[in-house]
Image: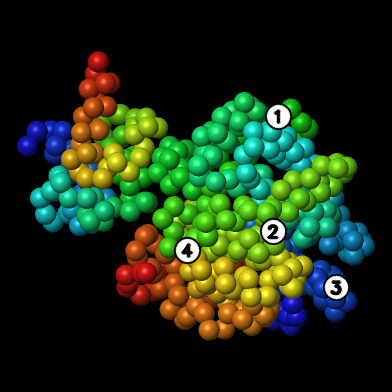
């Protein structure tokens, strides 16, 4: 997908991260990142903070190392970046082994599932460089298999885990009342630098009672077998490209559109958009035939997908809406909306770019009276 | 009105905007009083705190709080269990 160079109005730090998030595709972008990293006015504190907020620390580290900027970066910062990249690579290796362990147990019991998000993308969209950060390992199952999967996970040593949440009881109640995921599961492990492995198992492409959804049973049909790097002959099932795209976009939509994720500080970051851009880049032929549009229209998710792609195009200067022929979908009212609670949609005036850069998103408030949503 | 009913209704009124000005109808669905997925969590947590109870997993379902009447029955049941 073609894109013009970003404007630098938000400073060199932000421009570097935008370029890395959407993926460096030619020599002019390589040079631009290099120039920005060596500019005298670069604020390292700001760059590192934003890289951490957007889960891009290993990616930034890799960029600096591969560009041979060893002596252009303050020594202590370089050493820390180097360690962070190595640690991320180690964590990915541990996660891969655990992914295979869980996948084999589910497959042995004949439970349909796919591996999603970071673990599915790391070796395909990010070339196994160890640059894709992930907090946990994600799976998708059908709602009817929730109990069976919970039993399997307990047999594998996992238990429901809410300690990660600021208010553990709130999270526990919320997960029971909104059964789009199993409760987050964790297992203690004995590996250097990694104390716990978290697993997140979803059974919906969006959320409980979402007005936008694609049936998970349909999405799980005909998964693709994806090799696991470093494990010869071992594959994991992943969504085929059209459903991988739909899930990734709708998941981004969920985190960006629902007010509760803004308030909890866990809403959308640069890398979520980076995943979508890479998915389109890698699967352009499969995403631009009529099947994707037909599926979106069948399930009434076209406006939600257009919401994400319009914000993405505005922010990253991509042309995804045009490429996927969605110019006639979505509208200004939806584009500027954010859902506060079911049935009520609040107007929202900030640009996605401004929102992504903001460090106080929880203070983002609607600017117009709520209106009844669809 | 007994103490439990007073506390129960105060708890509902703290979270449900449509419950504030009117007497609470125990048969009306709480959704009609402004309950949504986020306020449901807040209401249940407030009930737990107010009455010193804990909803077990099998009660963390929509049926428990479909109406004020159903929710009050659940609260009373948990208080009785705790007392015994």
Is label 4 in a helix, a strand or a loop? loop
At horizontal 74% and vertical 46% (from top left) the residue drawn is A236
How many C-alpha atoms fall within 10 Å of the one at disc 4: few (<14), some, or many (≥20)?
some
Q: Which chain carries label 4?
A: A
Tag 2 residue: A240
For discs 1 and 4, the disc positioned in front in the rendered view: 4
Is label 2 in a helix, a strand or a loop? loop
Judge whether A143 appears above or below A25 on screen.
above
The disc, 4 or 3, on the residue closer to the chain's N-terminal end is 3
Tag 4 residue: A212
For discs 2 and 1, the disc positioned in front in the rendered view: 2
Measure the alpha-carbon separation of dots 3 and 1.
Answer: 39 Å
Numbered label attached to residue A30: 3
For discs 2 and 4, the disc positioned in front in the rendered view: 2
Q: Which chain carries label 1?
A: A
> Of all residues shown, which one is farthest toward the top?
B84
In the visual, does B52 lie left or right of A3? left
Measure the alpha-carbon separation of dots 4 and 3.
Answer: 38 Å
Spot occupied by residue A126 in the image (x, y as percentages of width and height): 79, 59
A35, B54: nearer the viewer = B54
A107, A149: nearer the viewer = A107
């Amino acid at each position: 997908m073609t894109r013009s160079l970003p404007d630098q109005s938000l400073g060199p730090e932000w421009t570097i991260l935008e370029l890395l998030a959407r993926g460096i595709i030619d020599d002019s972008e390589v040079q631009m990142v290099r120039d920005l990293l060596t500019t005298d006015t670069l604020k390292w504190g700001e760059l590192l903070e934003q890289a951490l907020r957007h889960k891009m620390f290993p990616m930034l580290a890799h960029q600096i190392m591969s560009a041979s900027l060893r002596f252009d970066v303050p020594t202590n910062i370089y050493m820390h970046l180097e360690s962070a990249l190595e640690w991320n690579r180690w964590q990915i290796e541990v996660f891969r082994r655990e992914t295979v362990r869980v996948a084999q147990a589910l497959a042995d019991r004949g439970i349909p599932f796919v591996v999603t998000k970071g673990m599915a993308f790391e070796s395909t969209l990010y070339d196994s460089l160890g640059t894709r950060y992930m907090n946990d390992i994600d799976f998708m199952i059908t709602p009817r298999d929730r109990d069976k999967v919970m039993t399997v996970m307990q047999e594998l040593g996992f238990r429901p885990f809410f300690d990660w949440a600021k208010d553990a009881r709130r999270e526990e109640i919320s997960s029971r009342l909104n059964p789009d995921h199993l409760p987050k599961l964790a297992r203690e492990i004995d590996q250097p630098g990694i104390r716990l492995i978290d697993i997140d198992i979803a059974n919906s492409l969006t959320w409980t009672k979402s007005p936008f959804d694609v049936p998970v049973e349909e999405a799980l049909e005909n998964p693709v077998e994806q090799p696991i790097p470093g494990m010869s002959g071992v594959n994991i099932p992943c969504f085929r490209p059209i459903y991988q795209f739909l899930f990734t976009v709708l998941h981004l939509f969920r985190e960006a559109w629902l007010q509760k994720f803004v308030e909890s500080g866990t809403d959308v970051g640069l890398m979520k958009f980076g995943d979508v851009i890479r998915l389109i880049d890698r699967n352009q032929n499969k995403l631009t035939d009529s099947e994707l549009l037909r599926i979106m229209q069948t399930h009434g998710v076209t406006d939600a997908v257009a919401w994400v792609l319009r914000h993405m195009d505005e922010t990253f200067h991509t042309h995804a809406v045009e490429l996927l022929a969605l110019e006639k979908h979505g509208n200004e009212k939806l584009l500027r909306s954010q859902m506060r609670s079911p049935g009520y949609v609040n107007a929202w005036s900030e640009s996605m770019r401004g929102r992504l850069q903001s460090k106080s998103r929880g203070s983002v408030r609607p600017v117009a009276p709520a209106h009844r949503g669809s | 009105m007994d103490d439990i009913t007073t506390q129960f209704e105060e708890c509902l009124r703290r979270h449900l905007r449509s419950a504030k000005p009117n007497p609470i109808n125990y048969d009306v669905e709480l959704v009609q009083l402004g309950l949504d997925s986020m306020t449901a969590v807040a209401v249940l947590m407030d009930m737990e705190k107010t009455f010193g109870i804990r909803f077990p997993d099998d009660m963390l379902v929509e049926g428990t709080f479909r109406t004020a009447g159903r929710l009050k029955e659940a609260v009373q049941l948990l208080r009785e269990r705790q007392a015994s």
